[in-house]
Image (cartoon, grey):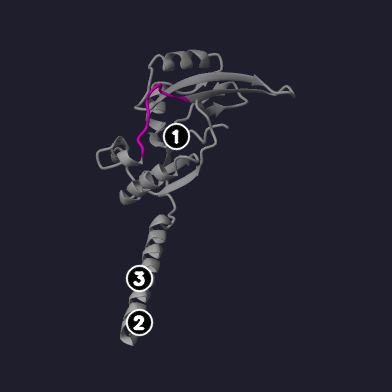
Amino acid sequence: MDILSCLVGVMLFLVIYTVLELGNAAFQLEMPGLRSPPPGSRPVIVVAAGGTVRVMDVEPPLRGLLAGFGTVSFAEAPELVRRANERGLSDDFFGYSLSYSDRVSAIGARSRAIELSVAERPGATGEDARQLDAGSRFAAALGRLDPRESWLRFAVDGESLDVFRRARTIALERGFTTGWEPLAQEFPLRYTLSGMATGELVPTTSPPKPER
């Protein structure tokens, strides 16, 4: 009986040790080391919302909308917007268009700007965690990006943590630097591309974060 008790004690110790080691390994996998984005790289937004994930790379459609335009006057801005929007640029999940705003604040200050609007395409849904594999649209979108030139900025809502973790794992395996933030904006998203106090507008192809 003493020998049997000792064997049971040893086996119980081994089981507890194994469980602790597995838990520690799982935690290490869940919390990958942070890396700084490559110098000069640009952020590509990955929207993790509603339990699905979608890549929103605004730079290619923005370049397409602004192709052929340079510095324009305020008087020419509405015509630029009209001609750009005739191109009807979109991707798998989002549609892209320009707008021209002319606002006067409560204190009488006037601001004019060209804005990029990003709207969800009706019926265009993303992929959930079970669909993310080597043949997914998410993986195909990453294949069109260079991890030396782009990093992924995840925008995550409360019901999309699982798909975010799965998508981030795929991105890390492909060498991408990633970051994340709570999804705080609603579509359509708007980016201010230019805004000056002079008589000219200079559209840029590197939009900042969307306005809230």
Residue 139 in the image, given as x and y percentages of width and height: 29, 40
**Which residue was labeled with disc 2?**
5
Work out whether residue 67 or residue 146 is closer to the camera in this orientation and state it: 146
| Mark seen at residue 15 | 3
For label 2, count other residues whose C-alpha is less than 10 Å away and answer few (under 14), some (14-19) or many (20+).
few
179 w.r.t. 107: above or below:
below
Residue 95 in the image, given as x and y percentages of width and height: 41, 23
Residue 209 in the image, given as x and y percentages of width and height: 52, 36
Whole-number angstrom distance, CA of label 2 to CA of label 1: 53 Å
Magenta highlight: main SS: loop
The segment highlighted magenta reads 118-128
Secondary element at image label 2:
helix
Whole-number angstrom distance, CA of label 3 to CA of label 1: 39 Å
Q: Is residue 48 left or right of residue 145?
A: right
Q: Is residue 79 visible?
A: yes
Residue 82 in the image, given as x and y percentages of width and height: 46, 13
Q: Image point 43% across, 49% down: which residue?
A: 37
| Mark seen at residue 133 | none
Q: Earlier in the sequence, mark 3 or mark 1?
A: 3
